[in-house]
Image (tube, rainbow, N blue to C red):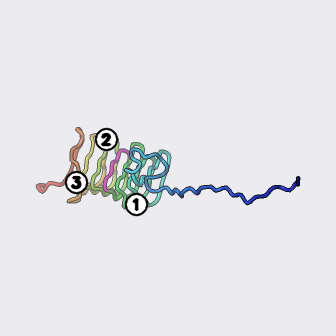
Amino acid sequence: MSSKPHSTNFRPEIPKRPLEIPTRGNSGRPAGQGSNAEGKKLTVGRDITLKGEIGSCDILVVEGVVEAQIKECSRLEVSEGGSFIGSAQVDEAEISGKFEGELTAGRVVVVNSAEMSGKITYGALQIENGARIKGELDYVEGSDTIINRAGNSGAITIPRKSDDS
């Protein structure tokens, strides 16, 4: 017998897997509640500071500190303990923490733990008892047409200006 290694032209066939590229709403997580419904969601967690310009997000959740200008976002949520400084143009805003700057939204909910200062331009405004607002409020005609005006007890809901005032 020879001591030469035995060589063959054998090549095992390894099936190629299709390339899986995560897309919006499909990041390898199991499909469940909120995976597709939330879309493009940015959460700035506690002890995190973010500065800059934010655009084209569906939901921005602020638990830390954000100093930014927001455009083309659907919803802004400033959690209790969170702080937003800057300007925001969104469809809906729910403020539980601190907001300082300019806010333009079709619907604004100010939770009892909120502290707001600056200018708020709104279509519908709900303020819970205990919230603090300092600044200018400006109503925009026609931007509250699809807003649910049923509020919690102990809240002030200001859907529109009266023609009598």
Disc 2 residue type (three-letter) = Asn
**Magenta-drawn stretch contains 93:** yes
Q: Reading the chain from its start, which is encountered first: label 2 or label 1?
A: 1
Count residues near mark 1 (Cα–Cα under 10 Å), then give few for <14, some for 14-19, many for 20+: few
Real-space Cα separation, disc 2 to disc 3, in angstroms: 24 Å
Real-space Cα separation, disc 2 to disc 1, in angstroms: 29 Å
Viewer-nearest of labels 2 and 3? 3
Query: Whole-percent x and y of residue 140?
Result: 23, 59
Count residues near mark 2 (Cα–Cα under 10 Å), then give few for <14, some for 14-19, many for 20+: some
The label on residue 146 is 3
Observer-nearest of 18 and 56:
18
Residue assigned mark 2 = 112
Seen in the image, is 7 located left or right of residue 89? right
2 to 82, vertically: above or below: below
The label on residue 19 is none
Determine the secondary structure under disc 3. loop
Q: Reading the chain from its start, which is encountered first: label 2 or label 3?
A: 2
Seen in the image, is 141 located left or right of residue 17? left
Observer-nearest of 83 and 144:
144
| Residue pictured at 37% horizontal, 58% vertical | 73
The magenta segment: 91-97
Q: Reading the chain from its start, which is encountered first: label 3 or label 1?
A: 1
Q: How many marks?
A: 3
Determine the secondary structure under disc 1. loop
23 to 128, vertically: above or below: below
Q: Please, which residue is most extreme toward the left here?
A: 164
Q: Please, which residue is most extreme toward the top here?
A: 153
| Residue pictured at 34% horizontal, 59% vertical | 89
Residue assigned mark 1 = 56
Query: Whole-percent x and y of residue 91?
Result: 31, 56
